[in-house]
Amino acid sequence: MLRVIIGLSTAATVILIIAAVFFCDRGEIGAIDREGMGHFQAGEYASALGVWRKGLERFPDSAKLHYRVGTTLAVRGDFPEAEVHLERAVGLAPDDPEVRRELALCYFQDDRLDDAECELKRVLAQADWFPEVHFFLGLIYEKRHERELALDEYVRELNVNPACTYAWAKIETWEKPPQAAEQGRR
């Protein structure tokens, strides 16, 4: 009888967690996010940024709003301010691989390759299947002239995400180093 009660209690807890995840975007933060996304999708980036920033005044501990502000600022090229918001989002939601990946991309765009690599590896530690993480690691290694590591990461990306056209393009256009090409002819 005790096992049945514990089993029902566990099942009820799981259902509550699923319901909380499903309905979490229905509150005030969700409404703010939807309004901002409406502007963003209409190409009204300044308006979207304004909505999300105003939302942060009311909800300064919202990982989602920090994430939205950070990614929008990064797209606009304001990496230092974007990094502040994305780092805050990671601090508030450390287990969200999407937030970490976006912080890594911001670091990459700001030429902070070591920081970008570190964040991408943290994403892989959480979710080794997460889309485009291996691809971006490949870009870092390629930028550092570590060609073999880069190629390995592009292949890993295709193993977990075969629809990644970026990784396919890298592999399809990959040129062998001159020494390897000559050895192949002999």
Image: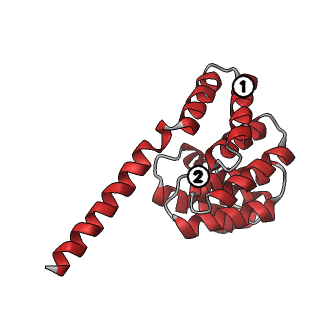
Question: Few, some or many C-alpha atoms within 10 Å of disc 2 (few <14, some 14-19, many ≥20)?
Answer: some
Q: Secondary structure at mark 2?
A: helix
Relative to the observer, which residue lies in front, 59 or 183? 59
- In the rendered image, the vertical position of residue 24 relative to residue 171, given as above or below: above
Colour basis: secondary structure
Residue 58's x, y, as percent?
A: 69, 39
Q: Residue at x 79, y 45 (%)?
A: 82
The residue depicted at 57 percent of the width and 57 percent of the height is: 96
Tell which of 90 and 119 is nearer to you: 90
Which residue does the image show at 78% across and 63% down from the upper left? 115
Q: Who is closer to the viewer here, 72 or 77?
A: 72
Q: Is residue 129 above or below residue 46?
A: below
Task: Classify mark 1: residues with Cα within 10 Å, few (<14), some (14-19) or many (20+).
Answer: some
Q: Position of residue 156 (x, y in %)?
A: 53, 62
Residue to which mark 1 is pinned? 45
Say which quarter of the image contains residue 39.
top right
User: As shown in the figure, which amino acid type bears the numbered disc 1?
Assistant: Tyr
Q: Which mark is residue 98?
A: 2
Q: Quadrant of the C terminus?
A: bottom right
Q: Quadrant of residue 152?
A: bottom right
Furthest toward the bottom, the residue is: 2
Tell me which label, 2 or 1, sits earlier in the chain.
1
